Amino acid sequence: MASVINSSQRELLRFEQLARRIASSEDTPIVVLATDAFARTAWRQGREEAIALERISAREFAAAAVTTLGVSDAVAHEPGSDVFIAALFDLPAVGRDDATPLGFVTAIGWIENRLRASLGIETYGGWAIVRGGAVGEAIDDALAWGRMAPARRRLAGGLHDLATPVSAISAVLSALLDGDLEPEKQLHFVRAAHDESQRLGRMIRTMLADQRAHAISLDTDVGAAVAYALRAVASLARAHGVSIVMRDETACNVAIDPDTLAAVFVNLFDNAIKHGRVNGRIEIAVGCHANRCDVFVDDDGPGIPEHLREHVFRSGGRGLSRTEGSGLGLMSVRELLGRGGGAIDVSDAPLGGARFTLRLPRGRD
């Protein structure tokens, strides 16, 4: 089958196009990569730079995926998204021993290395099998697998280090069980086993400390991240006649890195301006709790009916607004927050429009 994409001449498939193709197939493997680079570039260098980087990245991913996976398959990217997908329609014997997942893992590593070397962007990703046409669930599974990769590498290294003292203790105990040792030698072996057990304990404590260190992100001042985002969307707000007001400036630090949090607010404010009311109003408030920080972003637009509230966080999802757009801003917000241990939902705002509530893990203040 001829490739559905020529990375130098054709656009990649849209997610919806790829989903339709997958719906007509059974048990389709997909390889998924995502990056924070576009959101970070948007608020640091501007949207034009971010769009240019996204286009180049899409071409690089397409070329790398087709070459690395060794098959002619569908490659998709939705403009405005930070996710890339390659679907392997031609892969035979899915689920059999010769359709090894190790091939996917290796391919993902090579694609990540190519994007890092050619564009200097960091990505993460994974693979999954789409069953019953459930593309969204498979993408979530693949990205969740990718997010765990650093933890898996640390665990693998730690387990390798633990093998040495465990082997030493096992050898000592085997010698003691033989029962042919003189009392003096028995004492020597017991001391050796004790020393190795102490070493093992220290290594385990180090691994646990490392795990806790990686679980706690840098403290970020919510107010500072909001201020960055407001500056980034100021011209867009003026063009729409929208006023943005900090209704409550309660100081609160959260355990999410500043780049990610600023990118979340940029996407959220951009969405509220574009899909709210012209000459409208957006209000922001912050509430601190013992172990979390809530941020409320209210607008006076048309609001979002209850049956559409989960839909707006999906690719292509929109509420009542007729404003053109990719529908990917809120999907990106949820994805960025999820990586940092946060969450977002939508309800009715006191202003009459939509209220987006961000629940963020508290920092150390």
Image: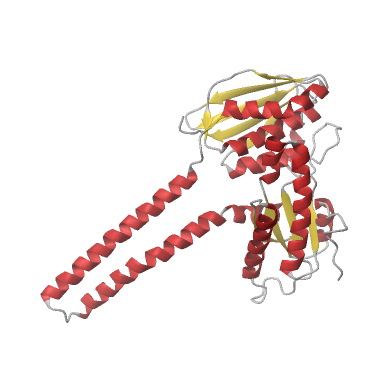
Q: The N terminus is located in which quarter? A: bottom right
Residue at point 55% right, 21% down? 250
Rendering coords of residue 143 (x, y %): 65, 53
Q: Quadrant of residue 186?
A: bottom left
Q: Residue at x 74, y 63 (%)?
A: 65
Relative depth, front residue between 147 and 318 = 147
Q: Which x, y percent locates residue 251?
A: 53, 23
Residue 132 visible to an observer of this rendering: no
The answer to which of 77 and 355 lies nearer the viewer is 77
Res. 288 visible in picture: yes
For the image, the number of numbered tags is 0
Q: Residue 275, how many percent across, how many down?
A: 80, 30
The quarter holding residue 3 reads bottom right
The answer to whether residue 63 is above or below residue 98 is above
Which of the 4 image quadrants contains residue 145? bottom right
- Image point 35% across, 52% down: which residue? 205
Camera-nearest residue between 324 and 210: 210
Instruction: Report the front residue among 309 and 221.
Output: 221
Q: Please say which color scheme the image uses.
A: secondary structure
Q: Give the side of residue 316 with respect to residue 206, left or right.
A: right
Task: Say if 229 sits above or below 22 in the image.
Answer: above
Provide residue 150's location: percent of width, then percent of height.
54, 55
Task: Determine the residue located farthest toward the left in the rendered image.
Answer: 183
